[in-house]
Image (cartoon, helix red, strand yellow):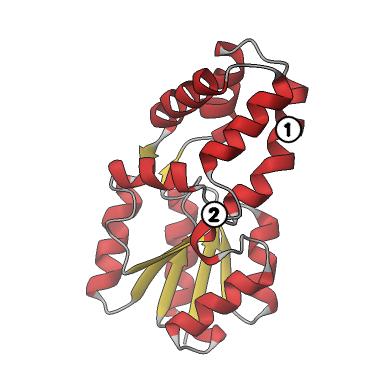
Amino acid sequence: MKAIVFDIGGVMAMGNNLKTHYIPLIKSMKLDEKNYFNSYKKHVWGASRGKITSKDMISLIAKDLKVDSKKLYNNWIKYKKRSIKKNVELENYIKKLKKKGYVVGSMSGVLELHNKLFREKRIYDVFDFNIFSFEVGYNKPDIQIYKLLIKKLKLSPKEIIFIDDVTKCISPAKKLGMKTILYKNNSQLFKELGEKLNKK
């Protein structure tokens, strides 16, 4: 194994997006939950792949829900900021991996607005490289973003370990020949990763 690649949301950036961001946002704006998520799912595809900006996406959602777009945008940022918590224990573990000579990066499906907020919280600082869906035009589980990762690393897929907390995002990596770990918590990750790295 030569490279270890982590997802960000739910792994390095802790917290449940639904519980800590979207539900508080919905309640603060007195929105209908079902209508909100229907609109969100309709527009997030393009925003996460850089086809439209996050601000445009939020404006489209506001239009669908017939609410003030500026108010929705401001509340969106407010609750997202509150929901971001860095996984410091994992960050320290990654520092040890790097000292052992492993290349450690991240690959995340992320909106450019959330990316900016993650940067403010220094979520990405520990990684050797970061691949962002809104910059490359593909998002997990699009097979193309995994191929971009392999091309960037210039390694055989079997030399790469990919870690994500979503099962459907693990499958394409496995299909291409990478080793994978479905993240549940730090203890489970450290155990499984240690086993894979020490396997002869």
Which residue is label 1 attached to? 39
The residue at 58%/69% (across/down) is: 180
Does residue 140 show up? yes
Residue 113: image location, x then y, percent? 45, 42
- Left or right side of 112 for 86: left
Figure check: 99 above or below 14: below
- Pointers 1 and 2 in contact (CB under 8 A)? no
Q: What is the x, y in percent for residue 49?
A: 60, 57
Snapshot quadrant of residue 93? bottom left
Residue at 52% across / 28% down in the picture? 21
Q: Does label 1 or label 2 sit earlier along the sequence? A: 1
Determine the residue positioned at 63% across, 82% down: 177
- Amino acid type, callout 1: Ser
Task: Please tell me which residue lies in front, 165 or 32.
Answer: 32
- Circle 2 is placed at which residue position? 183
The reply, left or right, for residue 123 in relation to residue 195 is: left
Camera-side residue of 71 and 9 = 71
Observer-side mark, 1 or 2, equals 1
Does dot 1 land on a helix, a strand or a loop?
helix
Report, in whole angstroms, how far the alpha carbon at label 1 lies from the one at label 2.
29 Å
- The answer to whether residue 1 of the structure is visible from this angle is no
Figure check: 105 above or below 42: below
User: Helix, strand or loop at disc 2?
Assistant: loop
- In the orientation shown, which residue stands out farthest toward the left? 99
Place residue 143 in its image quadrant.
bottom right
Of the pair 119 and 73, the residue shown nearer to us: 73
In the rendered image, the vertical position of residue 156 relative to residue 192, given as above or below: below
Q: What type is the residue that disc 2 sits on?
A: Tyr
Residue in the image at 25% along x and 63% along y: 95
Where is residue 51 drawn, in percent x and y? 61, 55
Q: Position of residue 77 (x, y in %)?
A: 44, 29
